[in-house]
Image (cartoon, rainbow, N blue to C red):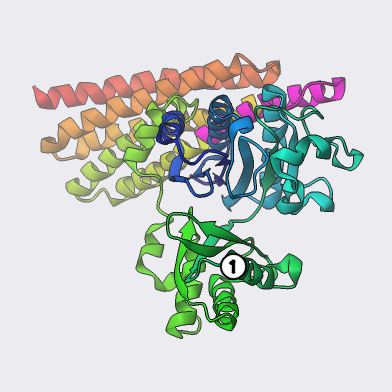
Amino acid sequence: MNQILECVPNFSEGRDPQFRRELELVLERFPVKVLDLSLDPDHNRADCTFLGAPAAVEECAAAVCARAVELIDMRTHSGSHPRMGAVDVVPFVPIRGLETADAVEIAHRFGRSFAERHAIPVFFYEDACTSEARRNLADVRRGEYEGMAAKLADPEWTVDAGPQELNARSGVTAVGARMPLIAFNVNLGTDDLSVAKAIAAAVRHSSGGLRYVKAMGLEVADTGLVQVSMNLVDYRRTPIHRALELVRAEAARYGVPVRRCELVGMVPLEALVDAAGYYLQVPGLDCADVIEHHLLDRETSLAEFLDALASGAATPGGGSASALSGALAAGLVAMVARNAGGMDEVAEEADDLRSAFQKLVDADAAAFEQVMVAFRMPKETPEQKAERSAAIQAGYKAAVEPPFEVCTHALRVLELAGVVAERGNPNAISDVGVAVLLAASALEGAAMNVEINLGSIKDEDYRAARADGLRTLRAEAAGRREAALARVRAELD
């Protein structure tokens, strides 16, 4: 997975266990990794965190937010956390292989689609904001649900998408793009809410505290204590330990101890390592010093790929499966070549082909996601229609190239399979046969993916060139396949 996008929607329901189950049923349909789904009864709020390929994340966000809109009625909602809508906030966070501008584009596209589909007013915030007055989520949400009707009547708060009138049932939604946010709460050894509020005021940036910190004082009903609830919006510039130590110092002024801290949702490893380095007094402690860090950048596991393949999402599909089939074929050819001896060059070439197929598993899915993104582009004006049409055509051409490359590589694997069938260990001849069948399936499956995408392309010269190329590849592959299988059958007999 070359590109990873995270989405962290927050919903205004934290007390009904069935609500969580309903969201889980939606999330299970998409090839995304769910990192967290938790209900907070004190705040009457649910936090959800999932990540994956951008198109899958965007589709999943649309589906899970749609289900929340169906289930939540803001007219009966109450909770201590500021909120203005059933789907309160939907931030998109670039994690790997994406820039902030990519997340902004996705946030804008999602926000417009969500607003239109559900008739809900939408404001863009943080890096997706359309004006600096809307960058800060607290400013956008000020007045909360109860004050939104009056806010929407103010010309300064013309919506970024959707109707200008309040949706009485669903409220208003903020959609944004930002870097990873850390929700960090500090519980104090007192039930005096005024102390928590005073400390929060000293800590948060808006009232003279730490930059990149938002904070408020809240009651924690089930403990009889109060807490300073913080959002650290840039943990690199204001780390966790700095915020905690300022809370601790301010609390000491009132003779109040820090009882415990809690993280809401997920946190970047880098932030925890930074805090560990501070408290352990290990200058320069880095993620690279953590053993598990070196396991995090691995490719998607086979189990994860198969789960994604079986999901209801459009990608990965037949093209990716064909590439995987090619990788298996190349792996078998390399194994037989190494066991035969004297065939190191064949083994090394098969290794290179296996690596190429592995990359094409992701490349095929990413290419077709480009088509899906193009179809979601606006088409209200003639200019938008033209831009959308061009993007769709470019997307289909991009979707042709990875499976065509699979076909080319699969033909070469068939050629190498013929070599190891002649010179390899006869005891491994069945492995050669499996490699031949897998390579042939990879080529034919990828060819089908090329054909279905070619059918939507209007460029006749491009279509003709790729169609001719497919005919040549298929014809040569048929001869290679039969020759190799004949050798395999002869050895088996």
The one nearer the camera, 222 or 456, is: 222
Up/down of 50 relative to 402, above or below? below
Magenta residue check for 388:
yes
Residue 342: in sight, yes or no?
A: yes
Image point (78%, 21%), residue name: 379
Image point (81%, 25%), residue name: 384
Image point (35%, 68%), residue name: 291
Q: Quadrant of the C terminus?
A: top left
Q: Position of residue 198 (x, y in %)?
A: 65, 70
Q: Is residue 386 left or right of residue 205?
A: right
The one nearer the camera, 135 or 222, is: 222
Up/down of 231 relative to 56, above or below? below
Up/down of 256 relative to 363, above or below? below
Magenta residue check for 259:
no
Secondary element type, mark 1: helix
Asked where in the image residue 222 lies, by quadrant, the reply is bottom left
Asked where in the image residue 289 lies, by quadrant, the reply is bottom left
Q: Which residues are magenta?
A: 365-393
Q: Position of residue 424 (x, y in %)?
A: 19, 40
Residue receiving disc 1: 196
Residue 97: in sight, yes or no?
A: no
